Amino acid sequence: MSGQIKPGEQLPTEAALCGELGVSRTTVREAVKRLHGKGLLEGGPRAGMKVLPTSRWNQLDGDILLWRTADGIDDALADQLYEVRGCVEPQACRMAAERATPEERQQICDLFDALRDESKDVCAHVAADVAFHLAIFGATHNPLLITVARAVRNGLELAFRQSQQRRRMSAVELALHGRIAAAIQAGNPSRAASAMTRLLEYSRIELTQA
């Protein structure tokens, strides 16, 4: 993730990795197998293991997102995350307003109420924020969109946490969450999508300042 071993470069041999890390060949092979599955490596112990271009990496893999954000979220990753969110979350709101069950609509409203609870600490507030957004994806009843939401969950949590460590959610952002919840409750797709678009704009500004 850090680029210390660049795309196209060879990894140390299996024997060298065992010696350097103090682990067995089985452990090294299992680790390599996992990195193969995430699109980071190709080759094997005999042919040599090479780092693949970043375009081949499964960038939505939970581990890869976690590793990329180990030292915090930088501007490049924030831009990428918000570009993805801008592509999918307004449409998810539109679909949720059309498809959500009465129970799902109520859940989204309940999660908004949790966001308004100022007695919660930052961790609980971030958890409620993430749950609010995931509930909207769940209400689309589209398995592919739900999978995308779960994939970017780590990025969402870190972005929300970094923003709220500077200060609690702004009044504008909170109001926009309320508009989204109300629009989905009322079954108004266009209003829900529009409110989410505005929320993403404000949220990105808050993250930049944080």
Image (tube, helix red, strand yellow):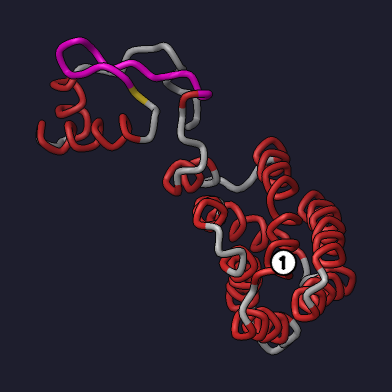
Asked whether 196 or 21 is in front, the reply is: 196
Residue kind at label 1, given as amino acid type: Gln
Q: Is residue 45 magenta?
A: yes
Q: Residue shown at 21%/26% (left/top)?
A: 17
Q: In this view, does 149 lie to the left or right of 201?
A: left
Q: Does 194 sit above or below residue 109?
A: above
Q: In which quarter of the image is residue 172?
A: bottom right
Q: Is residue 80 left or right of residue 186?
A: left
Q: Residue shown at 39%/29% (left/top)?
A: 39
Quadrant holding the C terminus: bottom right
Q: Residues within 10 Å of mark 1 (few under 14, many from 20)?
A: some
Q: Is mark 1 on a helix, strand or loop?
A: helix
Range of the magenta residues? 42-55
Q: Does 90 sit above or below residue 167?
A: above
In the rendered image, residue 66, in percent from the top left (x then y), is placed at: 48, 48
In the rendered image, residue 81, in percent from the top left (x then y), is placed at: 66, 45
In the rendered image, residue 130, in percent from the top left (x then y), is placed at: 61, 67
Q: Does 160 sit above or below residue 188?
A: above
Q: In this view, does 101 lie to the left or right of 199?
A: left
Q: Residue shown at 76%/54% (left/top)?
A: 207
In the rendered image, residue 61, in percent from the top left (x then y), is placed at: 45, 43
Q: Does the magenta stretch include residue 82?
A: no
Q: According to the image, label 1 marks what residue?
A: 164
